[in-house]
Amino acid sequence: MARIDIPDGEDVERIRLWKMTDGLSGAIDGFRIATHDKTLLSRRVREVARMRIAVINQCPI
């Protein structure tokens, strides 16, 4: 759940957030492609890294 006001809509919360800033969605999509589509890491290793980052940042997994 976001801690800022995000407009209501049909899209998931993160998409509605990205639409609030000009140019952000393109940058985020580029990051997604680089980290998921063109990575040398396996899906399993990426997920372990994501979980470790969440623990470091004290985020629920």
Image: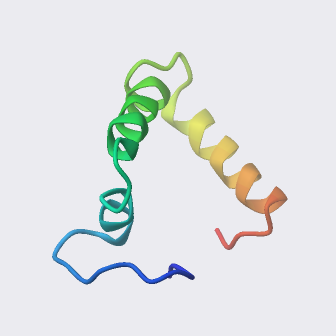
| Residue 19 picture location, percent across and down | 30, 58
Q: How many numbered discs sit on the rendered protein?
A: 0
**Residue drawn at x 38%, y 55% as measured from the top left:** 21
> Is 41 situated left or right of 24 in this image?
right
Depth check: give the residue in front, 33 or 43: 33
Residue furthest to the left? 10
| Residue 28 picture location, percent across and down | 42, 40
> Is 44 situated left or right of 50 in this image?
left
Residue furthest to the right? 56
> Is 24 situated left or right of 50 in this image?
left
**Residue drawn at x 49%, y 29% as measured from the top left:** 35
Q: Is residue 30 above or below residue 14?
A: above
Depth check: give the residue in front, 56 or 15: 15
The figure's colour scheme reads rainbow
Quadrant where the C terminus sits is bottom right
Image quadrant where residue 46 sits = top right
Depth check: give the residue in front, 42 or 18: 18
| Residue 37 picture location, percent across and down | 37, 25
Image quadrant where residue 55 sits = bottom right
| Residue 44 picture location, percent across and down | 56, 38
Image quadrant where residue 18 sits = bottom left
Q: Is residue 39 above or below residue 53?
A: above
**Residue drawn at x 30%, y 67% as measured from the top left:** 16
Q: Is residue 47 above or below residue 13?
A: above
